[in-house]
Amino acid sequence: MARTRADDYDEKRRQILKASARLFARHGFTGTSITMVAKACGASKALLYHYYASKDDVLFDILQLHLQTLLDTVERAAAAAAEPRARLHALSAALLDTYRDADAEHQIQIANLQLLPADKQDALRALERQIVAVFAAAIAAAVPDARQGVLKPLTMSLFGMLNWSYLWFRDGRGMTREAYARFATDMLLAGAAPAMEGLE
């Protein structure tokens, strides 16, 4: 007879993912054992295996949940702002706000995604591409003169400013997340036209 799921099964899985993300970020994926994860969760290895069959499965679920949350967030932000520049500001602010408690997940996305099997990487990179596409569409609307060959560098430059802020940004010190999102977006918008002229 199959073992029935407890009422708090999904919540326990989320707790495992959060604890594992912190450990993977601190010790690296290969440097973190299932025993370490179980200890951080206050559980036995046997109980942990009830929720996840392998570390790969844990890593995949961490990243899938993180990326799906980002995608859902930026899609809502894009739909809520009609004016192109306001939409880009809203996207940047939404992304940074979602990063607020996700430094570990963000770090292991950058460092550990490529350690997963190819099919799992493909699924996660498809989510990444969807997030990039939302931003690219917003930049294309806000910078209508952007040529096709320039749109990708513009988009990835904005991501560079936003994604790496976790290395230095600290809440309560200096700018707020919303202010930095506007700052980064305004720099991109102000610099796009002269930068494109320099390519001619």
Image (cartoon, rainbow, N blue to C red):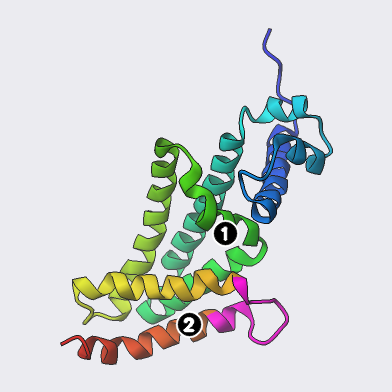
Q: Residue at x 79, y 41 (%)?
A: 41
Specify the quadrant of the image occupied by residue 53: top right
Task: Specify start and end residues of the magenta stretch as a single range.
Answer: 167-180
Q: Residue at x 56, y 52 (%)?
A: 66
> Which quarter of the rendering shows the N terminus?
top right
Q: Residue at x 39, y 81 (%)?
A: 85
The outermost residue toward the right is 42
Residue 106 numbered mark, or none: 1
Question: Which of the marked residues, 1 or 2, is nearer the chain's N terminus?
Answer: 1
Residue 69 visible here = no
Horizontal relation, residue 127 to residue 40: left or right? left
Does residue 73 sit above or below 175 in this rendering? above
Residue 93 numbered mark, or none: none
Horizontal relation, residue 171 to residue 159: left or right? right
Cβ atoms under marks 1 and 2 closer than 8 Å: no
| Nearer to me, 74 or 12 | 12
Does residue 6 sit above or below 180 in this rendering? above
Q: Position of residue 52 (x, y in %)?
A: 64, 30
Label 2 sits on a secondary structure element that is helix
> Which quarter of the rendering shows the C terminus?
bottom left
The outermost residue toward the front is 31
Residue 184 numbered mark, or none: 2
Does residue 172 sit above or below 97 in this rendering? below
- Give the residue type that dot 1 points to: His
Q: Position of residue 99 (x, y in %)?
A: 60, 64
Q: What secondary structure is the stretch in magenta mostly built from? A: loop
Q: Residue at x 63, y 76 (%)?
A: 168
